[in-house]
Image (cartoon, rainbow, N blue to C red):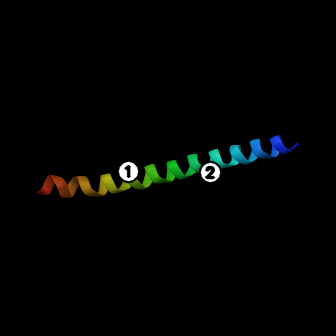
């Protein structure tokens, strides 16, 4: 019973972290897309 709860907690944490990574990657991509034109102008 207790190990099951721990497993589900770990699974939820994994989902949370993967969501965070996806969001972080999207933000990074937007920054790169925004900065590429500025780099080319210089």
Locate residue 34: give its quadrant: bottom left
Q: Is residue 37 above or below residue 6?
A: below
**As rendered, which of 25 and 33 lies closer to the eye?**
25
Q: CA distance from mark 1 to mark 2?
A: 20 Å
- Could you tell me which residue is drawn at 54 percent across and 52 percent down? 20
Q: Residues within 10 Å of mark 2 (few under 14, many from 20)?
A: few
**19 horizontally vs 11: left or right:** left
Where residue 27 appears, x then y in whole percent? 42, 56
**As rendered, which of 26 and 20 lies closer to the eye?**
20
Q: Earlier in the sequence, mark 1 or mark 2?
A: 2
Q: What mark, if any, has residue 2 been given in the picture? A: none
**Residue matched to label 1:** 29
Secondary structure at badge 2 equals helix
**26 horizontally vs 42: left or right:** right
Asked whether the beta carbons under mark 1 and mark 2 sit within 8 Å of each other, the answer is: no
**As rendered, which of 12 and 6 lies closer to the eye?**
6
Where residue 33 appears, x then y in whole percent? 31, 52
Which numbered mark, 1 or 2, is in the foreground of this view? 2
For the C terminus, the image quarter is bottom left
**Residue matched to label 2:** 16
Secondary structure at badge 1 equals helix
Q: Residues within 10 Å of mark 1 (few under 14, many from 20)?
A: few
């Amino acid at each position: 019973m207790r190990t099951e709860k721990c497993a589900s907690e770990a699974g939820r944490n994994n989902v949370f972290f993967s969501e965070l990574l996806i969001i972080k990657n999207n933000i990074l991509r937007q920054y790169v897309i925004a900065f590429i034109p500025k780099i080319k102008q210089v």
